[in-house]
Image (cartoon, rainbow, N blue to C red):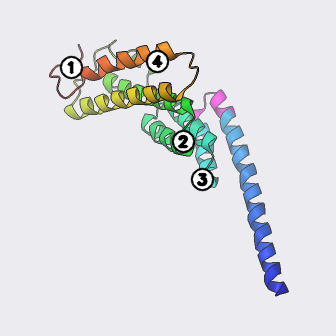
């Protein structure tokens, strides 16, 4: 009986020790990722944050920060997925909805202007003609992304309290609605 108790105690101590070590490793990885983000080294930040999630996938902040890093690296599909995972962990954190909306909107802009690498080219949805005629599938994807962005911005407004940029976000929603109509499958003409 004493041997069984001793084995259980050793197992318990091992589990606790491993959890503590993982927690310290997660904190260290997140700290390094923050430093990389501050220096604009998005790839190293992403690598550290992904490793952190591998160690402990239940930490909201790691998912949120990874979404930010993906957005800054213009890896919008990954950012969108990551923000959606963050929302599952903490659905009442309103800034996640705003960040998700930005990633969705920027992804649509990147499709429209044909370049996800040059932020300066994607400043305004209607500012430049697309470099090539968008395919029907691309138009549908842009319309969906813009509508998803509208939904995310709307959720940000609904869930948020004392939102300082409320009017700006409402104006953004109205603007995105007009842009989404330009890519609607019901509309026969493309943006001019």
- Of marks 4 and 1, which one's residue comes earlier in the chain? 4
Give the Cα separation between the discs numbered 1 and 3.
Answer: 43 Å
Counting residues from the start of the chain, the first of labels 2 and 4 encountered is 2
Tell me the crowding category of disc 3: few under 14, some 14 to 19, or many 20 or more residues within 10 angstroms, Cα based.
few
Where is mark 3, residue-wise? 54
Who is closer to the viewer here, 78 or 6? 6
Front disc: 1 or 2: 2
Of tags 2 and 4, the one toward the viewer is 4
Of the pair 10 and 91, the residue shown nearer to us: 91
Q: Residues within 10 Å of mark 1 (few under 14, many from 20)?
A: some
First-in-chain label (4 vs 3)? 3
Residue 183: where, in percent of width, then height?
Answer: 24, 24
Q: Which mark is residue 169?
A: 4
| Residue at 25%, 32% in the rendered image | 140
Real-space CA distance between mark 4 and mark 3, rounded to the nearest whole angstrom: 35 Å
Tell whether label 3 touches label 1 (CB within 8 Å): no
Label 2 secondary element? helix
**Of the image marks 2 and 3, the number of the one nearer the N terminus:** 3
The residue lying at 60 percent from left, 36 percent from top is 65
Judged by its main secondary structure, the magenta piece is helix
Looking at the rendering, the stretch of residues picked out in magenta corresponds to 35-42
Q: Are marks 4 and 1 in contact (CB under 8 Å)?
A: no
Side of 1 where 23 appears, left or right: left
Which numbered dot is residue 86? 2
Residue 40 among those drawn in magenta = yes
Q: Position of residue 179 (x, y in %)?
A: 30, 19
Q: What is the secondary structure assignment of the residue under circle 1?
A: loop
Mark 4–mark 1 distance (CA, rounded to whole Å): 25 Å
Check disc 1 and report the residue beneath it.
190
Which quadrant: the C terminus?
top left
Q: Nearer the viewer, residue 118 or 50?
A: 50
């Amino acid at each position: 009986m004493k041997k069984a108790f001793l084995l259980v105690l050793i197992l318990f101590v091992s589990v606790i020790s491993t959890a503590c070590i993982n927690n310290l490793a997660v904190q260290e990885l997140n700290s390094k990722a923050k430093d990389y983000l501050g220096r604009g080294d998005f790839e190293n930040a992403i690598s550290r944050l992904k490793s952190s999630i591998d160690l402990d996938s239940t930490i909201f902040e790691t998912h949120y920060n990874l979404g930010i890093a993906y957005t800054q690296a213009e890896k919008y599909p990954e950012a969108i997925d990551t923000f959606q995972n963050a929302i599952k962990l903490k659905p009442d954190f309103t800034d996640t909805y705003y960040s998700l909306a930005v990633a969705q909107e920027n992804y649509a802009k990147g499709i429209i202007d044909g370049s996800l690498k040059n932020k300066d080219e994607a400043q305004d949805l209607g500012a430049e003609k697309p470099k090539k005629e968008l395919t029907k599938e691309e138009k549908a994807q842009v319309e969906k992304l813009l509508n998803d962005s509208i939904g995310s911005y709307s959720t940000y407004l609904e869930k948020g309290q004392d939102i300082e940029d409320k009017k700006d976000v409402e104006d953004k929603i109205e603007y995105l609605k007009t842009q989404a109509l330009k890519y609607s499958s019901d509309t026969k003409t493309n943006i001019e």
